[in-house]
Amino acid sequence: MYLSKNKFFLILFIFLWIPFFCMSQIHYQTITLEELVRSSPYIFLVRAASPSFSLTKIKIHSKLLKELGIREKLQKKVPDFERRISHFEILEILKGESEERTISVLPANFLNSLELHVLYYGTGLSVSPIYLSYHSSEEVNEEHQDFIIFLQRSSRFKMYEWNTAGSSESINRKKDILELISAKQ
């Protein structure tokens, strides 16, 4: 069987791209500041603590799998799940309550990301989740300025968790945020 040059390159192109079509991608759905304020039980004015972050590794074991509700038999050993945890000093509470003055904050969608990590490495399941995200009106330098963060409590860990990806805002929007908070009460 003879293939023309064009057909050969078309088939080659398709086979080269098949692995990329099967890979998971994270998709983001952007929300407004009003939606972020409404969906955030905790809104704090903060500055970076010292240290400003730490890295944590979570070992994947049978008890954790049970807690996550994963019943599939893992076909492969799952590597540790590593995440960056941010640390902040609370300067002012805009919404919610906290006795703590220094808090640790897990990444947004932490438990879902942990579960997807286990399923991907343990069973080969590749899922493309859709996560909410927020885009600040100004770039926030988390290391060198005060800013506002939007949080929720983690359902498994005794820490806060970013409400969405990118859920921080410049201190210059504090008045707007306070107006949105008071309008909802």
Image (cartoon, rainbow, N blue to C red):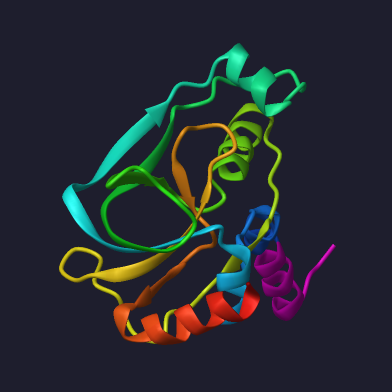
Percent from the top left, x then y, of residue 51? Answer: 16, 45
Magenta residues, dominant SS class = helix
Percent from the top left, x then y, of residue 20? Answer: 63, 59
Q: Nearer the viewer, residue 65 or 164?
A: 164
Tell me, yes or no, if residue 32 can be seen here. Answer: no
Residue visible at 47% across and 27% down in the picture: 79
Q: Is residue 7 magenta?
A: yes
**Res. 180 image quadrant:** bottom right
Residue visible at 45% across and 51% down in the picture: 97
Instruction: From this view, report whether residue 167 is shown above or below residue 32.
Output: above
Toward the right, the furthest residue is 1
Q: Nearer the viewer, residue 77 or 80?
A: 80
Q: Is residue 143 magenta?
A: no
**Res. 10 image quadrant:** bottom right
Percent from the top left, x then y, of residue 89? Answer: 24, 53
Residue visible at 15% across and 68% down in the picture: 144
Tell me, yes or no, if residue 65 can be seen here. Answer: yes
Q: Nearer the viewer, residue 45 or 59?
A: 45
Instruction: From this view, report whether residue 85 is shown above or below residue 34.
Output: above
**Res. 181 image quadrant:** bottom right
The region drawn magenta spans 1-14
Q: Nearer the viewer, residue 26 or 164?
A: 164
Q: Specify whether 119 is left or right of 138.
A: right
